[in-house]
Amino acid sequence: MATNVSKPAGGGTGRARRSEWRLVAYFTLHGLGFVGSTLLMTWGLFFLFFLALGGFSFDGFIHQLNNLTSRYVVADAARTGAFLNMFAIAHMILSAAIITFRRDRILPERKSERECHHG
């Protein structure tokens, strides 16, 4: 018996089936959610840093932000570039630390086939 080589295995027409696209969309949305939540956590750590510098008070927090922005606005191009490099490096280090702590959440949870949840 000969096999028909013109059709791909699985009986498909060469295009991804609907369930495969759903799977791709699921993993893409999960990955984007992971990246987005990591970004928000990193910004939250920067917020916590300035809040701690301000003595955990709203007035101190606003004073520290005013101090940072006033120095940034009057800085020359070299100093602004150095600040941006320092901020980018700190952001990468914090992001790497958060990703390390959340490494279990990179892939979605996989339920075993034997688990049955009936309501």
Image (cartoon, helix red, strand yellow):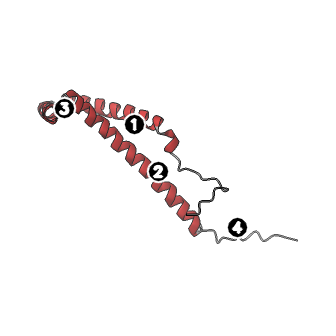
Q: Label 3 sits on what residue type?
A: Ala
Disc 4 marks a residue whose amino acid type is Gly
List the residue tagged with mark 3: 77
Tag 4 or tag 1, which sits nearer the N-term? 4
Q: CA distance from mark 1 to mark 4?
A: 41 Å
Q: Look at the numbered discs 4 and 2 and tell me whether their residues touch, using CB distance below 8 Å.
A: no
Mark pair 3, 2: CA separation: 36 Å
Counting residues from the N terminus, which is met first, the one under dot 3 or under dot 2?
2
Counting residues from the start of the chain, the first of labels 3 and 4 encountered is 4
State which mark lies toward you, 3 or 4. Answer: 4
Mark 4 lies on residue = 10
Please, which residue is most extreme toward the right here? 1
Cβ–Cβ below 8 Å for labels 1 and 3?
no
- The residue carrying mark 2 is 31
Q: Residue at x 56, y 69 (%)?
A: 18
Alpha-carbon neighbours of circle 1 within 10 Å: few (<14), some, or many (≥20)? many
